[in-house]
Image (cartoon, grey):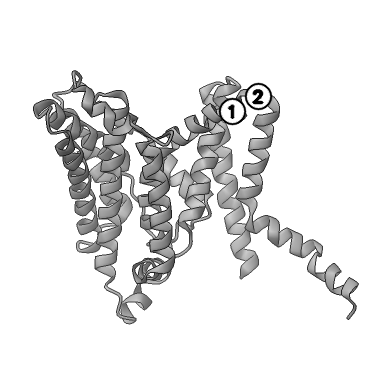
Protein backbone atom coordinates (compact mmCIF):
# COMPACT_ATOMS: atom_id res chain seq x y z
CA UNK A 1 0.00 0.00 0.00
CA UNK A 2 1.41 3.39 -0.98
CA UNK A 3 1.67 6.38 1.34
CA UNK A 4 -0.96 8.19 -0.72
CA UNK A 5 -3.45 5.31 -0.35
CA UNK A 6 -2.78 5.05 3.39
CA UNK A 7 -3.30 8.80 3.82
CA UNK A 8 -6.53 8.70 1.79
CA UNK A 9 -7.88 5.88 3.95
CA UNK A 10 -6.87 7.66 7.16
CA UNK A 11 -8.57 10.89 6.12
CA UNK A 12 -11.60 9.25 4.57
CA UNK A 13 -15.19 10.50 4.91
CA UNK A 14 -15.87 7.93 7.64
CA UNK A 15 -12.83 9.09 9.59
CA UNK A 16 -13.95 12.71 9.35
CA UNK A 17 -17.47 11.73 10.36
CA UNK A 18 -16.24 9.83 13.42
CA UNK A 19 -14.01 12.76 14.37
CA UNK A 20 -16.93 15.20 14.05
CA UNK A 21 -19.11 13.01 16.28
CA UNK A 22 -16.38 12.59 18.88
CA UNK A 23 -15.69 16.31 19.13
CA UNK A 24 -19.19 17.54 18.30
CA UNK A 25 -19.48 19.79 21.37
CA UNK A 26 -16.05 21.31 20.79
CA UNK A 27 -17.05 22.13 17.22
CA UNK A 28 -20.36 23.62 18.41
CA UNK A 29 -18.49 25.67 21.03
CA UNK A 30 -16.10 27.07 18.40
CA UNK A 31 -19.01 27.91 16.09
CA UNK A 32 -20.95 29.67 18.86
CA UNK A 33 -17.93 31.72 19.93
CA UNK A 34 -17.16 32.62 16.32
CA UNK A 35 -20.75 33.74 15.73
CA UNK A 36 -20.87 35.97 18.81
CA UNK A 37 -17.43 37.43 18.06
CA UNK A 38 -18.68 38.32 14.60
CA UNK A 39 -21.91 39.89 15.89
CA UNK A 40 -20.48 41.82 18.86
CA UNK A 41 -17.06 43.30 19.60
CA UNK A 42 -17.98 43.38 23.29
CA UNK A 43 -18.26 39.59 23.46
CA UNK A 44 -14.52 39.00 23.08
CA UNK A 45 -13.37 41.46 25.74
CA UNK A 46 -11.51 40.30 28.85
CA UNK A 47 -14.23 41.75 31.09
CA UNK A 48 -16.88 39.69 29.32
CA UNK A 49 -14.83 36.51 29.58
CA UNK A 50 -14.53 37.13 33.33
CA UNK A 51 -18.29 37.73 33.46
CA UNK A 52 -18.90 34.33 31.84
CA UNK A 53 -16.59 32.62 34.33
CA UNK A 54 -18.26 34.31 37.31
CA UNK A 55 -21.69 33.25 36.05
CA UNK A 56 -20.47 29.69 35.46
CA UNK A 57 -18.82 29.20 38.87
CA UNK A 58 -21.90 28.39 41.02
CA UNK A 59 -23.30 26.12 38.29
CA UNK A 60 -19.95 24.34 38.00
CA UNK A 61 -20.08 23.10 41.58
CA UNK A 62 -23.54 21.54 41.29
CA UNK A 63 -22.80 20.26 37.78
CA UNK A 64 -19.75 18.38 39.10
CA UNK A 65 -21.87 16.76 41.81
CA UNK A 66 -24.57 16.00 39.26
CA UNK A 67 -21.95 14.32 37.04
CA UNK A 68 -21.04 11.84 39.76
CA UNK A 69 -24.71 11.08 40.40
CA UNK A 70 -25.52 10.59 36.71
CA UNK A 71 -22.46 8.38 36.23
CA UNK A 72 -24.07 5.94 38.70
CA UNK A 73 -27.29 5.99 36.67
CA UNK A 74 -29.11 8.32 39.08
CA UNK A 75 -30.24 11.91 39.04
CA UNK A 76 -30.38 14.67 41.68
CA UNK A 77 -33.33 17.03 41.31
CA UNK A 78 -32.85 18.57 44.74
CA UNK A 79 -29.67 20.62 44.29
CA UNK A 80 -31.53 23.87 43.49
CA UNK A 81 -33.54 23.68 46.70
CA UNK A 82 -30.47 22.62 48.68
CA UNK A 83 -28.76 25.78 47.40
CA UNK A 84 -31.62 27.87 48.78
CA UNK A 85 -31.67 26.08 52.14
CA UNK A 86 -27.88 26.30 52.53
CA UNK A 87 -27.84 29.98 51.54
CA UNK A 88 -30.58 30.81 54.05
CA UNK A 89 -28.83 28.81 56.79
CA UNK A 90 -25.51 30.49 56.07
CA UNK A 91 -27.09 33.95 55.96
CA UNK A 92 -28.92 33.39 59.27
CA UNK A 93 -25.69 32.20 60.88
CA UNK A 94 -23.80 35.25 59.60
CA UNK A 95 -26.49 37.57 60.94
CA UNK A 96 -26.52 35.83 64.32
CA UNK A 97 -22.72 35.62 64.61
CA UNK A 98 -21.40 38.55 62.52
CA UNK A 99 -17.86 38.08 63.84
CA UNK A 100 -17.70 34.43 62.77
CA UNK A 101 -18.16 34.47 59.04
CA UNK A 102 -16.26 31.19 58.71
CA UNK A 103 -19.06 29.59 60.72
CA UNK A 104 -21.62 30.65 58.09
CA UNK A 105 -19.56 28.90 55.41
CA UNK A 106 -19.27 25.78 57.55
CA UNK A 107 -23.01 25.70 58.31
CA UNK A 108 -23.99 26.11 54.65
CA UNK A 109 -21.76 23.24 53.51
CA UNK A 110 -22.89 21.08 56.45
CA UNK A 111 -26.57 21.66 55.61
CA UNK A 112 -25.92 20.67 52.00
CA UNK A 113 -23.97 17.60 53.12
CA UNK A 114 -26.78 16.49 55.44
CA UNK A 115 -29.43 16.93 52.75
CA UNK A 116 -27.31 15.05 50.22
CA UNK A 117 -26.61 12.30 52.76
CA UNK A 118 -30.34 11.84 53.32
CA UNK A 119 -30.75 11.44 49.57
CA UNK A 120 -27.93 8.91 49.57
CA UNK A 121 -29.41 6.88 52.40
CA UNK A 122 -32.87 6.79 50.84
CA UNK A 123 -31.46 5.71 47.46
CA UNK A 124 -28.79 3.25 48.62
CA UNK A 125 -30.48 1.60 51.64
CA UNK A 126 -34.22 1.94 51.09
CA UNK A 127 -33.78 1.60 47.31
CA UNK A 128 -36.16 4.42 46.48
CA UNK A 129 -35.67 5.46 42.83
CA UNK A 130 -33.37 8.53 42.65
CA UNK A 131 -35.97 10.57 40.78
CA UNK A 132 -38.54 10.12 43.57
CA UNK A 133 -36.06 10.46 46.45
CA UNK A 134 -34.54 13.70 45.20
CA UNK A 135 -37.91 15.08 44.11
CA UNK A 136 -39.05 14.67 47.71
CA UNK A 137 -35.90 16.44 48.95
CA UNK A 138 -36.52 19.23 46.44
CA UNK A 139 -39.90 19.94 48.04
CA UNK A 140 -38.61 19.45 51.60
CA UNK A 141 -35.56 21.69 51.24
CA UNK A 142 -37.56 24.37 49.44
CA UNK A 143 -40.06 24.49 52.29
CA UNK A 144 -37.33 24.57 54.93
CA UNK A 145 -35.63 27.47 53.15
CA UNK A 146 -38.77 29.54 53.71
CA UNK A 147 -39.01 28.29 57.30
CA UNK A 148 -35.47 29.44 58.10
CA UNK A 149 -36.20 32.98 56.93
CA UNK A 150 -39.76 33.11 58.20
CA UNK A 151 -41.02 33.31 54.63
CA UNK A 152 -38.82 36.27 53.72
CA UNK A 153 -35.24 36.93 52.53
CA UNK A 154 -32.52 37.51 55.12
CA UNK A 155 -30.95 40.94 54.66
CA UNK A 156 -28.77 43.25 56.75
CA UNK A 157 -25.80 40.89 56.68
CA UNK A 158 -22.30 42.03 57.70
CA UNK A 159 -20.04 43.38 54.94
CA UNK A 160 -17.55 40.59 55.64
CA UNK A 161 -20.15 38.10 54.40
CA UNK A 162 -19.81 39.54 50.91
CA UNK A 163 -16.06 39.00 50.96
CA UNK A 164 -16.54 35.23 50.71
CA UNK A 165 -17.49 35.46 47.03
CA UNK A 166 -16.38 38.94 46.01
CA UNK A 167 -12.74 38.85 47.07
CA UNK A 168 -10.33 38.76 44.13
CA UNK A 169 -7.04 36.87 43.95
CA UNK A 170 -4.85 37.49 40.88
CA UNK A 171 -7.82 39.16 39.21
CA UNK A 172 -10.18 36.21 39.73
CA UNK A 173 -12.93 35.98 42.33
CA UNK A 174 -12.90 33.14 44.85
CA UNK A 175 -15.84 31.28 43.18
CA UNK A 176 -13.96 31.24 39.84
CA UNK A 177 -10.80 29.93 41.50
CA UNK A 178 -12.88 27.36 43.36
CA UNK A 179 -14.48 26.30 40.08
CA UNK A 180 -11.12 25.78 38.37
CA UNK A 181 -9.67 23.87 41.32
CA UNK A 182 -12.81 21.71 41.61
CA UNK A 183 -12.85 20.81 37.92
CA UNK A 184 -9.18 19.80 37.98
CA UNK A 185 -9.56 17.96 41.30
CA UNK A 186 -12.65 15.99 40.31
CA UNK A 187 -11.16 15.33 36.88
CA UNK A 188 -8.18 13.65 38.52
CA UNK A 189 -10.39 11.87 41.07
CA UNK A 190 -12.58 10.28 38.42
CA UNK A 191 -9.79 9.46 36.00
CA UNK A 192 -6.91 8.41 38.21
CA UNK A 193 -8.33 6.86 41.40
CA UNK A 194 -9.99 3.61 42.41
CA UNK A 195 -13.01 5.57 43.66
CA UNK A 196 -13.61 6.98 40.19
CA UNK A 197 -13.39 3.52 38.65
CA UNK A 198 -15.95 2.22 41.14
CA UNK A 199 -18.38 5.04 40.32
CA UNK A 200 -18.16 4.13 36.63
CA UNK A 201 -18.56 0.44 37.49
CA UNK A 202 -21.75 1.03 39.49
CA UNK A 203 -23.24 3.03 36.64
CA UNK A 204 -22.16 0.55 33.99
CA UNK A 205 -23.56 -2.54 35.68
CA UNK A 206 -24.43 -2.47 39.38
CA UNK A 207 -24.83 -6.25 39.70
CA UNK A 208 -21.49 -6.92 38.03
CA UNK A 209 -19.86 -4.30 40.28
CA UNK A 210 -21.25 -6.04 43.36
CA UNK A 211 -19.97 -9.40 42.15
CA UNK A 212 -16.56 -7.79 41.65
CA UNK A 213 -16.57 -6.70 45.30
CA UNK A 214 -17.56 -3.03 44.93
CA UNK A 215 -19.59 -1.71 47.87
CA UNK A 216 -22.26 -0.23 45.63
CA UNK A 217 -24.34 1.11 48.52
CA UNK A 218 -21.41 3.15 49.80
CA UNK A 219 -20.66 4.50 46.34
CA UNK A 220 -24.28 5.57 45.82
CA UNK A 221 -24.40 7.19 49.24
CA UNK A 222 -21.14 9.04 48.61
CA UNK A 223 -22.11 10.59 45.26
CA UNK A 224 -25.34 12.05 46.65
CA UNK A 225 -23.53 13.31 49.76
CA UNK A 226 -20.89 14.99 47.58
CA UNK A 227 -23.60 16.49 45.37
CA UNK A 228 -25.33 17.94 48.42
CA UNK A 229 -22.12 19.37 49.88
CA UNK A 230 -21.24 21.05 46.58
CA UNK A 231 -24.76 22.48 46.38
CA UNK A 232 -24.27 23.88 49.89
CA UNK A 233 -20.99 25.47 48.85
CA UNK A 234 -22.65 26.91 45.75
CA UNK A 235 -25.44 28.32 47.93
CA UNK A 236 -23.10 30.26 50.20
CA UNK A 237 -21.21 31.62 47.19
CA UNK A 238 -24.40 32.83 45.50
CA UNK A 239 -25.70 34.32 48.73
CA UNK A 240 -22.40 36.03 49.47
CA UNK A 241 -22.28 37.58 46.01
CA UNK A 242 -25.43 39.62 46.70
CA UNK A 243 -24.91 39.76 50.51
CA UNK A 244 -28.39 38.42 51.10
CA UNK A 245 -30.19 35.15 51.66
CA UNK A 246 -33.18 34.35 49.45
CA UNK A 247 -35.49 31.31 49.77
CA UNK A 248 -35.87 31.35 45.98
CA UNK A 249 -32.14 31.20 45.32
CA UNK A 250 -31.11 28.32 43.07
CA UNK A 251 -34.57 27.76 41.63
CA UNK A 252 -34.24 25.81 38.38
CA UNK A 253 -30.47 25.46 38.73
CA UNK A 254 -30.76 21.67 38.79
CA UNK A 255 -32.03 21.72 35.20
CA UNK A 256 -29.05 23.72 33.94
CA UNK A 257 -26.70 21.40 35.82
CA UNK A 258 -28.28 18.32 34.25
CA UNK A 259 -28.17 20.03 30.85
CA UNK A 260 -24.44 20.73 31.24
CA UNK A 261 -23.75 17.08 32.09
CA UNK A 262 -25.85 15.75 29.19
CA UNK A 263 -24.44 18.23 26.67
CA UNK A 264 -20.98 17.24 27.89
CA UNK A 265 -21.58 13.70 26.66
CA UNK A 266 -22.69 11.83 29.78
CA UNK A 267 -25.30 9.09 29.43
CA UNK A 268 -28.38 9.32 31.66
CA UNK A 269 -28.25 5.53 31.88
CA UNK A 270 -24.94 5.82 33.75
CA UNK A 271 -21.44 4.51 33.25
CA UNK A 272 -20.33 7.05 30.64
CA UNK A 273 -19.28 10.68 30.88
CA UNK A 274 -16.37 12.82 32.04
CA UNK A 275 -15.72 15.81 34.27
CA UNK A 276 -14.05 17.57 31.35
CA UNK A 277 -17.13 17.01 29.21
CA UNK A 278 -19.31 18.53 31.92
CA UNK A 279 -17.00 21.54 32.15
CA UNK A 280 -17.28 22.02 28.39
CA UNK A 281 -21.07 21.65 28.49
CA UNK A 282 -21.27 24.18 31.32
CA UNK A 283 -19.13 26.74 29.52
CA UNK A 284 -21.12 26.19 26.34
CA UNK A 285 -24.40 26.98 28.13
CA UNK A 286 -22.99 30.02 29.93
CA UNK A 287 -21.35 31.31 26.75
CA UNK A 288 -24.64 30.90 24.93
CA UNK A 289 -26.53 32.72 27.70
CA UNK A 290 -24.01 35.55 27.73
CA UNK A 291 -23.94 35.97 23.96
CA UNK A 292 -27.71 35.95 23.65
CA UNK A 293 -27.98 38.55 26.43
CA UNK A 294 -25.49 40.79 24.62
CA UNK A 295 -27.55 40.47 21.44
CA UNK A 296 -30.67 41.25 23.55
CA UNK A 297 -32.44 38.06 22.51
CA UNK A 298 -35.67 37.68 24.56
CA UNK A 299 -35.48 35.24 27.48
CA UNK A 300 -38.18 32.96 26.06
CA UNK A 301 -36.21 32.52 22.83
CA UNK A 302 -33.11 31.74 24.89
CA UNK A 303 -35.02 28.88 26.53
CA UNK A 304 -36.09 27.61 23.11
CA UNK A 305 -32.50 27.63 21.85
CA UNK A 306 -31.18 25.85 24.95
CA UNK A 307 -33.93 23.26 24.69
CA UNK A 308 -33.04 22.51 21.08
CA UNK A 309 -29.35 22.27 22.05
CA UNK A 310 -30.08 19.74 24.80
CA UNK A 311 -32.27 17.54 22.61
CA UNK A 312 -29.70 17.70 19.80
CA UNK A 313 -26.90 16.71 22.19
CA UNK A 314 -28.84 13.68 23.41
CA UNK A 315 -29.80 12.72 19.84
CA UNK A 316 -26.16 12.87 18.73
CA UNK A 317 -25.15 10.80 21.77
CA UNK A 318 -27.74 8.11 20.97
CA UNK A 319 -26.71 8.07 17.31
CA UNK A 320 -23.03 7.81 18.21
CA UNK A 321 -23.77 4.93 20.63
CA UNK A 322 -25.56 3.02 17.87
CA UNK A 323 -22.60 3.55 15.55
CA UNK A 324 -20.21 2.19 18.17
CA UNK A 325 -22.40 -0.90 18.64
Give the residue furthest to the left. Answer: 96
Does any portion of residue 184 appear in the rendered image? yes
Does any portion of residue 249 appear in the rendered image? no
- Image location of residue 51, percent across then percent down: 48, 29
Other-residue count near label 2 (Cα within 10 Å), few / some / many at <14 / 14–19 / ≥20: few
Q: Where is 165 relative to 264, above or below?
A: above
Q: CA distance from mark 2 to mark 1?
A: 7 Å
Q: How many marks?
A: 2
Query: At 24% across and 66% down in the image, what residue appears?
Result: 218
Return the residue nearer the eye: 174 or 252. 174
- Image location of residue 208, percent across then percent down: 37, 78
- Image location of residue 66, percent across then percent down: 37, 50
Other-residue count near label 1 (Cα within 10 Å), few / some / many at <14 / 14–19 / ≥20: few
Return the residue nearer the eye: 243 or 28. 243
What residue is shown with label 2? 41
Q: Secondary structure at mark 2?
A: loop
What residue is shown with label 1? 45
Amino acid sequence: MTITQDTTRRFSAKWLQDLAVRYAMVIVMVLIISFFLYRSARFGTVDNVVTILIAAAPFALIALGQTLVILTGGIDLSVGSIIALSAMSGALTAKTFPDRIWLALLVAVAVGLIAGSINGLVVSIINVPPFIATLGMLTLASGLAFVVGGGAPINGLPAAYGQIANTEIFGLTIPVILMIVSIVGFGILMKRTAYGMRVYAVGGNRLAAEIAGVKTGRILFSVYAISGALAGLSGIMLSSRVISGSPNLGQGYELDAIAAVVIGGASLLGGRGTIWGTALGLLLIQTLNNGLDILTVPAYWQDVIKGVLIVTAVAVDVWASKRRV
